[in-house]
Image (cartoon, rainbow, N blue to C red):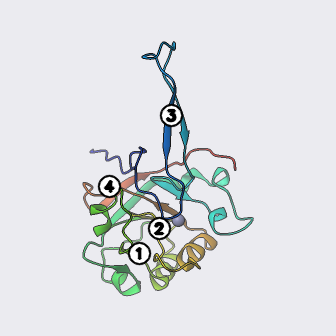
Amino acid sequence: MTIFDVSLALKRGMLTYPGDPAFSIEHRFSITNGDGFNLSLLSLTTHAGTHVDAPAHYIDGGATIDSMTLNIMIGPGVIIDMRGRSVIDRRALEESALTDETRVFFKTDNSLKIREPAFRDDYTYIADSGAELLIERNVKLVGIDYLSVDKIDDEDAPVHKLLLSSGVLIVEGLDLLNVPAGPCRISCPPLLLLI
Ligand SMILES: [Zn+2]
């Protein structure tokens, strides 16, 4: 069994969503500088790199990540090849290899862009109709290889709200460049973070 790490490296200058504060790391203690150990101080948003969106991200008073069951985030799933498409809508999904798995990651042309530090607003996103189909198919975990499931200029974030209010968790910032499409086992437990 081949194990693929689908997470982005947290590093200085890494890609962030427009408006998000940058990731930073400061070597607070350093053996080179005479300290007894190395220890770093991190500064990052909860949206940095590969992450799970909890309902509270878009729903005021919604469930927070610490209350999410790990059962959704670990188990069988499928990676659907959506390369060549600019939007994942109902029709694209009906024409895809979508199975009845409850965990679905989308591999798109975004995987060619996500390691680049410059944000690209022409990323492949999920349309409302695509989100509705995923909910109808009883999908519980949806992942995509860029920093939002919604279109860049849609500030109402309809896809986030549709999915999160229907009990579907979202994974963003996946790096699927070298991962083959098809059935797989998914494991994406988030940090136990109390906000
Ligand atoms: Zn999100």
* Percent of width and height locating residue 60: 72, 67
C-beta proximity under 8 Å, tags 2 and 4: no
Disc 4 CB within 8 Å of nearest ligand 1 atom: no
Q: CA distance from mark 3 to mark 1?
A: 34 Å
Contact, mark 3 vs mark 1 (Cβ under 8 Å): no
Q: Which residue is mark 1?
A: 125
The answer for how far apart the CA atoms under marks 3 and 4 are is: 22 Å
Q: Which numbered circle lies on residue 115?
A: 4
* Mark 3 crowd level (few <14, some 14–19, many ≥20, 10 Å Cα): few
Asked which secondary structure carries label 3, the reply is strand
Q: Looking at the image, is mark 4 or mark 1 earlier in the sequence? A: 4
Amino acid carrying label 4: it is Arg
Ranked by sequence position, the earlier of labels 2 and 4 is 4
Q: Residue furthest right?
A: 61
Residue of label 3: 26
Residue type at numbered disc 1:
Tyr
Q: Count residues near mark 1 (Cα–Cα under 10 Å), then give few for <14, some for 14-19, many for 20+.
A: many
Report whether 83 appears left or right of 106: left
- Pick the residue in front: 165 or 23: 23
Q: CA distance from mark 4 to mark 1?
A: 17 Å
Any atom of ligand 1 within 8 Å of the CB at mark 2?
A: yes
Residue at position x 39%, y 57% in the image: 174
Q: Does label 2 or label 1 sit earlier along the sequence?
A: 1
Q: Nearer the viewer, residue 176 or 78?
A: 176
Callout 2 secondary element: loop
Residue that mark 2 sits on: 148
* Residue at mark 2 to residue at mark 1: CA–CA distance: 7 Å
Count residues near mark 2 (Cα–Cα under 10 Å), then give few for <14, some for 14-19, many for 20+.
Answer: many
